[in-house]
Image: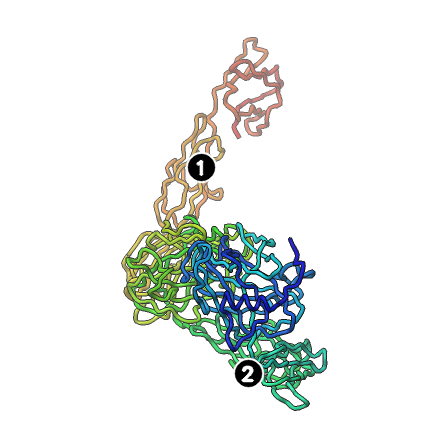
Amino acid sequence: MKAATYMKTINQSLFALSILVLSLFASHAAIVYTQPPAGSGLLPSAWWTPNGSDYDQYAWDNFTLASSAPVTEVKWRGGFYYGSSTNSNTGFTISFYSSIGGNSQPDIASVFAPNPLATYTVSGNPGQTSAGTIGGVAMYDYDFVLPAPFQAVAGTVYWIQIEAAQAGIPDWGIATGSGGNGSYFRQFAYVGDKFFTMGPGDAAFTLLTADTAIYSVAASASPTNGGTIAGTGLFPTGVTASLVANPATNFAFVNWTQNGAVVSSSANYSFAVTSNRTIVANFTTGSSITTLVSPASGGSVTGGGSYTNGTSVTLTATTNANYSFVNWTENGTQVSTSKSYTFTVSSNRTLTANFSSATANPAVYYSQPPAPGTGLILSSFLSPDGMDGDNYCYDDFVIPVTQDITEIRWFGTYQYGNLVSDFTVRIYSSITGGSQPDIGSVYAANPLKSYDVGGNAGETFTNGMYAYDFILPSSFHAVAGTRYWVQIEASQTSYPNGWSFIHGSGGNGRYFLQVTGSSASLAAGDASFILIGAAGTNSSTITTLAQPAGGGTTSGDGAYANGLTNTVSAVAASGYIFAGWSANGTTVSTNATYSFTVTTNTTLSAIFNPTFAVSLTASPVAGGTVTGAGTYLALSGVNAVAAPNAGYKFVNWTEAGVPVSTSTNYTFNVAGARTLVANFAAIPVPMTMTNTSRTNLALSWNPATTGWVLQESPDLIAWTNSTRLLTTNGTQRSVTITPLVGNKFFRLSHP
């Protein structure tokens, strides 16, 4: 980066050249610095309003005055390097910056001093006159008288930035000048990043001061550590000076005095300068009263500031339209419910004025509820300068009745993890035919309404998405049958910015998509949002009930505009099943989700029937199969069927060990949950006996049948499992019994 190698100074030849080329002089102004135009070159310095783009470029050029002076007027030359119309300029911003150490570039990111030092904005093309075509480029001269002087101190390196705002791809640039150090500082963007560099050339601009007597306004603080003062400097005769006293911590402003006489008791002291003045800002020990507003759009407060301890202070809350005052809180604790809260100052305090919706009976006048799982619609802006690829979603709506809209709710999520810092809500009319929003109209004011939310609109995570709610600080008057378009734009301060709408349902399946640096067109889908106003003769109340009360939950009740399609939903609780929606004893739908046109007050009952689980098991599991288990409505008939497997026979059905049926088909009406067991027993297998030698007894049976145990008894009463050696030979399991003393009985038993 190339540093400036010498100070810019003024000389009479530059004055003469400026007079000749720019015609910048008037009898009431004198030039204090000039870099007159030099040829046809342009230094790009414009941005794409309102959200910026990767086409944006900014130029800063430095200057130094030989003598301290109040700059009261700025003139400059510029043109359009792509030939845009002068109407594309919506305004200019003129800013003055200090330098970083070494004076090599403007201090645009200082954490040590306020920058810019001064900023002035003007709409349109101030004082624009044609300077002719130079090098094939139409050039224009501009002239702007500053609403307050910029105090330039001799020998200090300052930087001026003159930036055009254009409604389209920016192509305005400030003309190249002469007499500077031959370099300027520039910024350009690419994919959300900012790049800075020095460039060759000087900007063409002239700084002037009023051609009258110049007076000094000086001020000091008493005591010196009591606070700081802003607004001092040099002023032409008759120009208003505005001094501001800012108390330090634990101090309060008392008054302004000159030669010991009080001239003002306001911390902001303005006066027309007609002579040199030396003024003292007097401070005393005191406390700071800080006021906050929640939500930011709810209203405003007065009375905050620094006060002498012991002073009686009154804070006053003023509500915006559609809001009502709730209370004053300190650290979350209520201290007053009166809009005007009076107390004696004794310490530093931070007090919050809380507001809520003033709509006592809200009604839904348009609804596109979320339809999760159907996709996302990008609608976010990389704050503060924007970038190519930023997406903006506009969705249309038509309400069935004329109504003032007081509240808007919407639903979204993050495709990336960067949180929303703010939302902007805008409402537009349609172009002729209603096919898209009129975002570039020259015939009507658009947007029709624009709201800065001032935060994340109460972002709340619920049901896998984020819900937002914003009460409009001024109502939007929607006319029945008119097609409007709503744009809800998230501001995200870090890249990538990926806030998106959840897809909605109930719209016309289209939205208008604008992509910075690309085309704008219709796309498939609906954004999810709800418009709310006060209930009245144009709305009806929908009430939903669950019968019985514990049978399930319902949603969709509330007040809705007549003619609007509303949807109610029912979800059965455990142990119940949804049967249908009933109105006045008549079933109107058997679908758990029911949509209908609102025409009158209606009570809808979601009928839930109790259900019972019937559990069937086989014992042993290998003994057979069971069918008929499931969930049944109360008093429904159940047929429990048991089917034995080969080698088993059915014994009975038992419940909690108690036999309830010996039939394989057990039929009953269910009146509660039941757990039934189908019991099976193995069928005995044939056993053969041989005694060929009349001395040994041999018993044999098929080993393929499992579960059978050889038992023996001396008296056919007491049986024990045999411990005799069993052998398996092919398809037979055998045991050989040697001669016994006394009686012995044998059997195969299946436990």
Q: How is the image coloured?
A: rainbow
Badge 2 element: loop
Quickly name the residue at label 2: 238
Residue under the point 69% across and 60% down: 102
Q: Toward the viewer: 467 or 126? A: 126
Q: Toward the viewer: 351 or 606? A: 351
Residue 501 seen anywhere in this rendered image of the structure: no
Q: Amino acid at mark 2?
A: Gly
* Residue 468, placed above or below residue 283: above
Badge 1 element: strand
Q: Toward the viewer: 288 or 652? A: 288
Residue 171 seen anywhere in this rendered image of the structure: yes
Query: How many numbered circles does the render carry?
Result: 2
Q: Toward the viewer: 32 or 15? A: 15
Which quarter of the picture shows residue 740?
A: top right
* Residue 485, placed above or below residue 619: below
| Residue 660 located left or right of residue 712 | left
Res 678 label: 1
Q: Position of residue 588 (x, y in %)?
A: 28, 56
Which quarter of the picture shows residue 69?
A: bottom right
Of the image marks 2 and 1, the number of the one nearer the N terminus: 2
